[in-house]
Image (cartoon, rainbow, N blue to C red):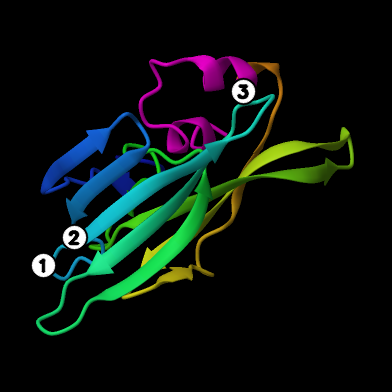
Amino acid sequence: MTGVGARPLRFARPLSTIFDTLDVIDADLEGDGSHEIIVATLDGVSNGMAVPYWTVLALTPGRYDWIIDSAKVEEYSSLGSWVAVRGERSCNLLQTQWVNGFEAQRGTGLYLQASWQTFDGWFVQRVDRPVISRRYLYRFERERSDTTIRDAPWGWLRRH
């Protein structure tokens, strides 16, 4: 997983994927040498655009207790929702959602918007990273249906 100013993230090992509705990953999200377990479950898919709705849980195993937090994500992918920023040891979750937006030149429209979430026992939105958005136009529609883009949604957003 790479992106603007990002370095590749290496997962220790993908544990399993069942019918594309469950994704389990063992990875070091905090960059501290200890691994978290990430479980993403597909909650449902919308009619029309077929937007997938996911719940991403991060579990930090402890000696006596576990810390668990979750985030809702639209368009989740294990290859494109986790981005490591160059120069940082931690990994960020791109929490994406479809929103209505406005541009002075174009008026209202549909946008895919992503905020950067860091994990430190719980997900926290980073205020030092900009929210990224991209308007859903014909080119984006074609990219969204292109199954060769493996690092979506980051692959869709980093190009713009």
As displayed, is residue 91 above or below residue 15?
below
* Magenta span of residues: 140-160
Residue at the bottom extreme, as displayed: 64
Q: Are marks 1 and 3 in contact (CB under 8 Å)?
A: no
Q: Say which quadrant the N terminus sits in.
A: top left
Give amino acid for label 1: Gly
For disc 3, the marked residue is 140
Give the mark nearer the N terminus: 1 vs 3.
1
Name the spot of residue 143 as percent of width and height, x first: 54, 19
As displayed, is residue 36 above or below residue 79?
below
Residue drawn at (84%, 41%) of the image: 103
Q: Are marks 1 and 2 in contact (CB under 8 Å)?
A: yes
Give the mark nearer the N terminus: 3 vs 2.
2
Name the spot of residue 89 as percent of width and height, x first: 23, 62
Name the spot of residue 19 as percent of width and height, x first: 32, 29
Residue drawn at (49%, 68%) of the image: 126
Number of residues whose C-alpha sits closer than 10 Å to that of mark 2, classed few (under 14), some (14–19) or many (20 or more): many
Dot 2 lies on which element?
loop
Dot 1 lies on which element?
loop
Q: CA distance from mark 3 to mark 2?
A: 32 Å
Q: Residue 158 vs residue 67: left or right?
A: right
The answer to whether any part of residue 5 appears in the image is no
Front residue of 14 and 20: 20
Front residue of 115 and 14: 14
For disc 1, the marked residue is 33
Number of residues whose C-alpha sits closer than 10 Å to that of mark 1, classed few (under 14), some (14–19) or many (20 or more): few
